[in-house]
Image (cartoon, rainbow, N blue to C red):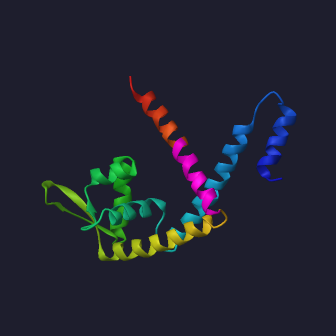
Amino acid sequence: MDHVDRIRQQWNTERPDLDVGPMVTLGRMTRLARRLRHSHEEVFAKHGLNSAGFDVLATLRRSGPPHALTPKALLASTMVTSGTMTNRLDRLAAQGLVERTPDPADGRGTVIRLTEKGHSVIDAAVGDHVANQHRLLAHLGTEDRAALDRIFTRWLAALETEESEGDTP
């Protein structure tokens, strides 16, 4: 019996009228997400990054040469506010990992580009991150991972559809 089972048992005693099955499933997912997030942050910290910095650098790196994007494109990819993005970019620029350059397509705008140092840092960090992800999933077999992927894909699509339908007037 794990921590979540004990909570279920307590609720079943105190409120037998409630079906706490969803609480059990989501409680385990929350505990798992917390452990995964902590493990990711440990890997990022070894490279002088946090998850926010990793996200920006990884977005630039996977965009392909010249590994540069407009702030608007970065915002769309990371889904944070412009103020949050500015703070992230300021920290990364202070570390010498990105630089702001004039946008050749729009002289009034800027482009955020990985520096050589940023390129080296994200390549090392993403390599360690992927190795860590393999380690974290090593407890599951190929079939279990495929089943989880199918379930999470279907579940996420349903929740995103529900969310987008709620956004329309």
**What are the residue bounds of the magenta stretch?**
141-154
- Measured as percent of width and height from the top left, residue 54 is found at 43, 64
- Measured as percent of width and height from the top left, residue 123 is found at 40, 74
* 115 displayed left or right of 7: left
Q: Is residue 153 magenta?
A: yes
Q: Nearer the viewer, residue 150 or 158?
A: 150
Q: Residue furthest right?
A: 13
* 8 displayed left or right of 38: right
Can the viewer see residue 42 in this picture? Answer: no
Q: Is residue 3 magenta?
A: no
Q: Nearer the viewer, residue 15 or 101?
A: 15
- Measured as percent of width and height from the top left, residue 121 is found at 40, 74
Q: Is residue 145 above or below residue 159?
A: below
* 96 displayed left or right of 165: left
* 23 displayed left or right of 157: right
Q: Is residue 144 above or below residue 121?
A: above
